[in-house]
Every structure is written in C-alpha cells, then in structure tokens.
Image (tube, grey):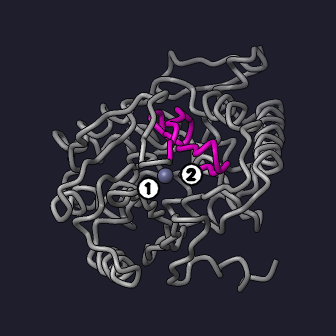
C-alpha cells in the first residue's frame, strides 16, 4: 500500500459508512496517530456519538462543522459513548455534554484511572516515570521528561454512566450491544450492532497498527493476556463491517484478529529469545527488538515511543512468566526475568 493510500482515511470527511452511520475523522495535530474517527449514529430522536476527539478547538470546530453539513445540531446529540478513556476518544465528552445536554458513558473499569487524573493529576502524570524506573528504564523516563514535561490538561469529565459490558444502547430500531474488551485499556468497550453486523471497534481491532498495551494506571492485571482474550471474544462475531477509531473501515474482522494474534505470538517468541540471550529487564529486551513496521531500534524512536516500547516489552515478558516460560523476580527494585 502506498503512503498516500495509507493516510487517505485521515482527511476531513463525512462518510456514510452504513445506513445512518457517519465516520468523521478529527485531527490529532502532532500525534503519530494523526487522526481519530468518531462515528455519528442516527436514531429516531437524535444522534449517538461514538468517541469524540481531543479537547481542543480544532477538533471541536471539525465536529461542529460536520454536524452542520449533515443538517444536525449539537443539541440533537443524545449521548457520547467513549470506547475508552484516552484523550483522543474521551477528551471532548464534557464539552459535547455541555452543548447538547446528552449523557456521557464510559467503561466502569476506567473509573480508577479517571479519578486519578481528575483528583491527583500531578501524581497520575508522574506514575509513568515511576513505572519506567521499575522496568529499569530510568534513562527513557529522563529523556521523556526533557522532551515533553508532563502537560497540564483540563481534568477529564465525570461520565453520567459507567458501563461494565453486557448492557445495550437502544436507538429506536437499533440495538447496540456493549462488549467488554479489556486490553488496550482495562475498561475498553466495543459496540456491536448485531442486526447490521457492525462493530464499533474503538482501539481494540485496528486495521493498520496494533494498539499500545500496558500504558495505564493502575498497573495490576495482565494487559496482553486480557487483550488476547478480548480478541478471541470478538473474532467470530457476525460482523460485516468494522469501524475502527484509527484507520479506514474494513470488512474482514476474523482475518485482522488473526493477524494481531500472530503479531503477538511472534513478539512473545522474540522476547523469550532475548531473555535466553541474556536480557533481564523490559528495558534490555526492548533494546533487542525491532520496533514499528520500519523495524527501528529502540533508541531511534522518539522518547514517547521509547516508553511505549518498554511497556510493550514488559507486558509480553509478563505473559511469558504467566505461562511458566520465564521466571519473574519482583524482589529487586526493577522487574527482572530469567529462565525458569
Ligand atoms: Zn487508545
């Protein structure tokens, strides 16, 4: 695929991807993801917005302009369903609510993260740094801090509804099932319209990239194990159309799930081999592995992506330990791995 084709989905658009469902890409200037798709779903009494973009003026303007092109008004937005708490999905939720009077829904397992960022923002922002130190990557933490000191951001809006999965969002004749899909974040949710076979996939199943794993507070649980289980859970859904938050809409869900599972199987083997060759920490393993589809070295990535790489290595090492293929020693100040 040419670079131009790869980026075509990011351009301003108002695509009716299914009857009464529009894809609206909103810009993420300066971010490697480049844009986020929000989906506007028409019901008999108004609209549902699935994900909503950064809390920045340019996202807001694009969203308003798109609604205007459709002949819709903000006050007709009945609800915002955020697939997860990340800023590109949840940032504008509070502003849309203020302008529309609608509700905001978020996964219930995002609650702890949300409250940490709302009530103790400084500590929450510093937690990634402490996490990097635990993974023997204090150098990455220092580079990250120099490159981009933790930004002050407006606190996240408190949702009206926390959803655990298993609920349904009903919009007239449409029923959207809420599917719990922990992995990318612990509270990630997808929406599935069974009758039409439409999966609103958020960041769970993306067509061109693999979602980051292990980048969140709190730090318990096993993000990769959860992610693989959640992939299994959606693989055989009768979906004819997948609506991802980043990248173009696509049709073959099972094929893409299989590719993602295969990607992580290969990564697990690479991590195992790195430890067999003497690497002991996520930081050391990350240095041995190639990163991105261009197969870059860790230290050739920008500091933010170095952090993602170290976290990603850690969640793979953790799964290898859970499977008994590695031994994990947390007694030291840094997590260390060895052969059993
Ligand atoms: Zn995300």
- Mark number displayed over residue 22: none
| Residue for badge 1 | 50
Crowd tier of the residue under label 2, counting other residues whose Cα lies within 10 Å: few below 14, some 14–19, many 20 or above: many
| Residue placed most toward the observer, 340 or 182 | 182
| Residue placed most toward the observer, 138 or 78 | 78
Element assignment for label 1: strand
| Rendering quarter of residue 277 | top right
Q: Say if 214 sits above or below 154 in the image.
A: above
Residue at (53, 44) in percent of width and height: 191
Q: Which residues are magenta?
A: 174-202
| Rendering quarter of residue 29 | bottom left
Quadrant the C terminus occupies: top right
Quadrant the N terminus occupies: bottom right
How far across and down, in percent of the image, does residue 243 sit? 61, 58
| Residue placed most toward the observer, 16 or 259 | 16
Say left or right for 235 vs 21.
right
Residues marked 2 and 1 touching at CB (< 8 Å): yes
How far across and down, in percent of the image, does residue 332 sit? 50, 20
Q: Earlier in the sequence, mark 2 or mark 1?
A: 1
Element assignment for label 2: strand
Residue at (68, 26) in percent of width and height: 319
Calculate the distance from the C-alpha at mark 2 to the C-alpha at mark 1: 8 Å
Crowd tier of the residue under label 1, counting other residues whose Cα lies within 10 Å: few below 14, some 14–19, many 20 or above: many
Residue 211 covered by magenta stretch: no
| Residue for badge 2 | 200
How far across and down, in percent of the image, does residue 14 sit? 51, 79
């Amino acid at each position: 695929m040419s670079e131009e084709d790869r980026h075509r989905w990011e351009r301003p658009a108002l695509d009716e991807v299914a009857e009464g469902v529009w894809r609206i890409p909103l810009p993420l200037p300066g971010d490697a993801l480049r844009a986020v798709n929000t989906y506007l779903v028409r019901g008999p009494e108004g609209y549902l917005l699935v994900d909503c973009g950064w809390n920045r003026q340019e996202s807001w303007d694009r969203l308003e302009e798109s609604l205007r092109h459709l002949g819709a008004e903000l006050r007709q937005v009945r609800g915002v369903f955020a697939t997860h708490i990340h800023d590109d999905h949840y940032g504008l939720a509070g502003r849309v609510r203020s302008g529309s009077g609608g509700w905001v829904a978020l996964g219930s397992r995002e609650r702890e993260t949300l409250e940490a960022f709302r009530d103790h923002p400084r500590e929450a922002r510093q937690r990634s740094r402490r996490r990097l130190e635990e993974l023997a990557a204090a150098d990455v933490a220092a580079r990250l801090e120099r490159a981009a000191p933790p930004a002050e951001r407006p606190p996240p809006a408190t949702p009206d509804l926390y959803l655990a999965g298993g609920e349904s969002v009903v919009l007239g004749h449409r029923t959207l099932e809420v599917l719990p899909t922990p992995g990318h974040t612990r509270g990630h949710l997808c929406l599935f319209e069974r009758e039409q076979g439409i999966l609103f996939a958020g960041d769970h199943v993306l067509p061109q990239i693999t979602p980051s794993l292990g980048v969140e507070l709190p730090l318990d649980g096993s993000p990769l194990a959860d992610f693989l289980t959640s992939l299994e859970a959606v693989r055989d859904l009768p979906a004819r159309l997948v609506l991802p938050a980043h990248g173009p809409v696509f049709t073959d869900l099972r094929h893409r799930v299989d590719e993602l599972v295969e990607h992580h199987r290969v990564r697990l083997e690479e991590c195992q081999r790195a430890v067999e060759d003497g690497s002991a920490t996520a930081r050391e393993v990350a240095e041995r592995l190639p990163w991105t589809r261009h197969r870059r070295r860790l230290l050739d990535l920008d500091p933010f992506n170095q952090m993602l790489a170290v976290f990603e290595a850690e969640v793979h090492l953790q799964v290898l330990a859970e499977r008994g293929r590695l031994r994990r020693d947390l007694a030291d100040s840094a997590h260390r791995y060895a052969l059993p």
